[in-house]
Image (tube, rainbow, N blue to C red):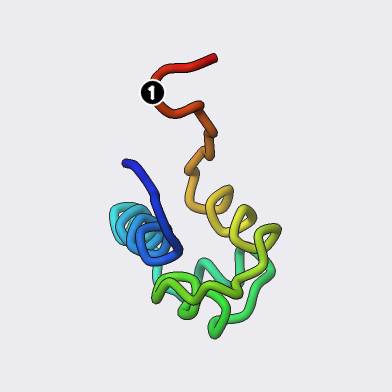
Amino acid sequence: MKIYDAADFGRAVRTFRKAKGYTQQQIADLSGCSLMFVSNLERGKETAELGKALAVLATIGVDVRADARGGAK
């Protein structure tokens, strides 16, 4: 799944969370974030803290990878 902006990131988080069968509250509790943070993250709020966002992804079992565009190394 390619992510180009905060909205794409939020949609990805929501998709993976729902696929695992978690509620936003469960993810908040397991990742040490607030329910409001998880909600804002899924809505693509651009001021979301990266560290917390990565904790949410780790909680739902999603790895993050950065690749150069166009196959450049």
Give the camera-side residue of 72 and 60: 72
Q: Amino acid at mark 1?
A: Gly
Relative to 48, is 2 above or below? above
Task: Check disc 1: other Cα within 10 Å, few if <14, some if 14-19, many if 20+.
Answer: few
Q: Quadrant of the N terminus?
A: top left
Give the camera-side residue of 71 and 38: 71
**Residue sitting at x 48%, y 51%:** 60
Number of disc labels? 1
Where is residue 37, by image quadrant? bottom right
x and y percent of residue 5 in the render? Answer: 42, 59
Q: Quadrant of the C terminus?
A: top right
**Residue sitting at x 30%, y 57%:** 15
Question: Which structural element holds mark 1?
Answer: helix
Residue marked by disc 1: 70
x and y percent of residue 65 in the render? Answer: 53, 33
**Residue sitting at x 57%, y 72%:** 28
Side of 38 where 49 appears, left or right: right
**Residue sitting at x 60%, y 75%:** 47
Give the camera-side residue of 70 and 34: 70
The residue furthest top is 73
Relative to 48, is 4 above or below? above
Relative to 21, is 37 above or below? below
The residue furthest bottom is 36
Side of 48 where 16 appears, left or right: left
x and y percent of residue 56 in the render? Answer: 56, 59
Side of 11 where 35 appears, left or right: right
